[in-house]
């Protein structure tokens, strides 16, 4: 029964991640969503409220991080994995958020749009979860 509970919980959390992605237009302020759907390589960045954008990017990262940490906990039940994940998420957020902010405030022309696209992608999508799950799985079963 515990295993079924864990599987159902993981599925529900993954559905939450999908819902965040599916309703990103209505949940978060991000004028870059539409911008990157266009021919962004030749266009200047759109007018935006930078503070609100940074706040919403941070909120989205926080939501994805909480859900991702819960998934890691349910899969492995290992406090060391959670501690390490929390440290990695924190360090990566600070680094990527600084890079994101620097690009937003200094972007002139179109040269930095591709870098902005990928840095923003790492901040708004739960990509770290996709990296950490196989890494922890390998670590756990390698040590047995």
Image: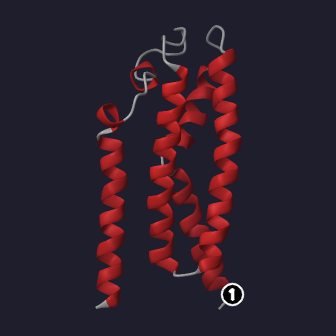
Q: Residue at image x 48%, y 59%?
A: 66
Q: Residue at image x 63%, y 30%?
A: 100
Which of 76/115 is in front? 76
Label 1 sits on residue: 143
The x, y position of residue 81, in whole percent, is 62, 74
Quarter of the figure with residue 139:
bottom right
Count of marks placed on residues: 1
For disc 1, the neighbor class at 10 Å (few under 14, some 14 to 19, many from 20) is few
Quarter of the figure with residue 13:
bottom left
The x, y position of residue 105, in whole percent, is 66, 18
Q: Is residue 63 above or below residue 76?
A: above
Which of 131/95 is in front? 95
The x, y position of residue 107, in whole percent, is 65, 15
Name the side, left or right, on which 136 lies relative to 59.
right
The image quadrant where one finds the N terminus is bottom left
Name the side, left or right, on which 39 lies relative to 8.
right
Q: Is residue 81 above or below residue 39?
A: below
Q: Residue at image x 48%, y 26%?
A: 52
Q: Secondary structure at mark 1?
A: loop
The image quadrant where one finds the C terminus is bottom right
The x, y position of residue 102, in whole percent, is 70, 25
Name the side, left or right, on which 13 lies relative to 116.
left
Quarter of the figure with residue 117:
top right
Q: Residue at image x 61%, y 84%?
A: 141
């Amino acid at each position: 029964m515990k295993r079924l509970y864990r599987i159902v919980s993981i599925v529900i959390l993954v559905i939450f991640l999908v819902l965040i992605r599916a309703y990103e237009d209505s949940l978060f302020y991000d004028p870059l969503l539409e911008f990157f759907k266009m021919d962004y390589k030749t266009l200047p960045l759109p007018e935006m409220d930078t503070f609100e954008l940074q706040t919403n990017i941070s909120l989205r990262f926080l939501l994805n991080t909480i859900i991702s940490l819960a998934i890691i906990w349910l899969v492995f039940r290992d406090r060391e994995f959670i501690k390490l994940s929390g440290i990695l998420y924190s360090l990566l957020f600070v680094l990527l958020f600084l890079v994101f902010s620097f690009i937003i405030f200094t972007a002139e022309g179109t040269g930095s749009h591709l870098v902005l696209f990928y840095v923003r992608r790492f901040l708004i999508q739960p990509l770290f979860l996709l990296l950490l799950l196989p890494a922890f799985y390998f670590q756990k079963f390698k040590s047995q």
